[in-house]
């Protein structure tokens, strides 16, 4: 949530300080998305530099079959490692599913 607020603030500040003009032909959706991604990435880097890896962060995660969430507290470093491992596992799963032979339908 904080990253979105920071990204919005940076976008607003960037819009106010832009001095070059662009034509309508330059304003393609792909280019706009690319520029926005660069701004969000830059704001995430600035935000992360303000905090230490040893900061404790607590999150409430949903539990299937329950109305109550489960509170998990880990350091910023541990959350990042868990996210990287989850992304790597998902990528491996997708890669394996693409490598499987598809049976002939004919």
Image (cartoon, rainbow, N blue to C red):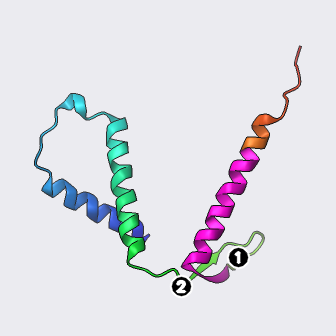
Q: What element carries label 2?
A: loop
Does 86 lie within the magenta span? yes
Q: Which of marks 2 and 1 is nearer the N terminus?
A: 2
- Magenta range is 70-94
Q: Give the vertical position of 92 relative to 23 (above or below).
A: below
Query: What is the distance, in whole Å, between disc 2 and disc 1 at their CAs?
Result: 31 Å
Residue 13 is drawn in which quadrant?
bottom left
Q: Is residue 19 left or right of residue 84?
A: left
Find numbered disc 1 in the image and state the secondary structure of the residue it sits on. Answer: loop
Asked if residue 81 lies in the magenta stretch, the reply is yes
Q: Name the image quarter holding residue 31.
A: top left
At 46% from the left and 82% from the top, the residue drawn is 52
Residue contact at pointers 2 and 1, CB within 8 angstroms: no
x and y percentages locating residue 14 in the rendered image: 21, 57
Residue 61 is drawn in which quadrant?
bottom right
Q: Looking at the image, which residue is at 12% across and 44% down? A: 20
Res 67 label: 1
The residue mark sitting in front, 2 or 1, is 2
**Numbered label attached to residue 54:** 2
Is 11 above or below relative to 73?
Answer: above
Task: Pick whichever, 104 or 53, lies toward us.
Answer: 53
Q: Please, is residue 41 above or below residue 31 in the view?
A: below
């Amino acid at each position: 949530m904080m990253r979105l607020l920071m990204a919005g603030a940076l976008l607003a500040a960037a819009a106010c300080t832009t001095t070059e003009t662009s034509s309508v032909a330059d304003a393609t959706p792909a280019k706009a998305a690319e520029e926005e991604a660069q701004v969000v990435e830059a704001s995430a880097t600035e935000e992360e530099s303000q905090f230490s890896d040893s900061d404790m962060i607590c999150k409430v995660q949903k539990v299937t079959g329950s109305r109550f969430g489960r509170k998990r507290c880990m350091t910023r470093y541990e959350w990042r490692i868990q996210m990287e491992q989850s992304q790597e596992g998902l990528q491996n799963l997708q890669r394996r599913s693409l490598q499987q032979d598809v049976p002939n339908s004919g």
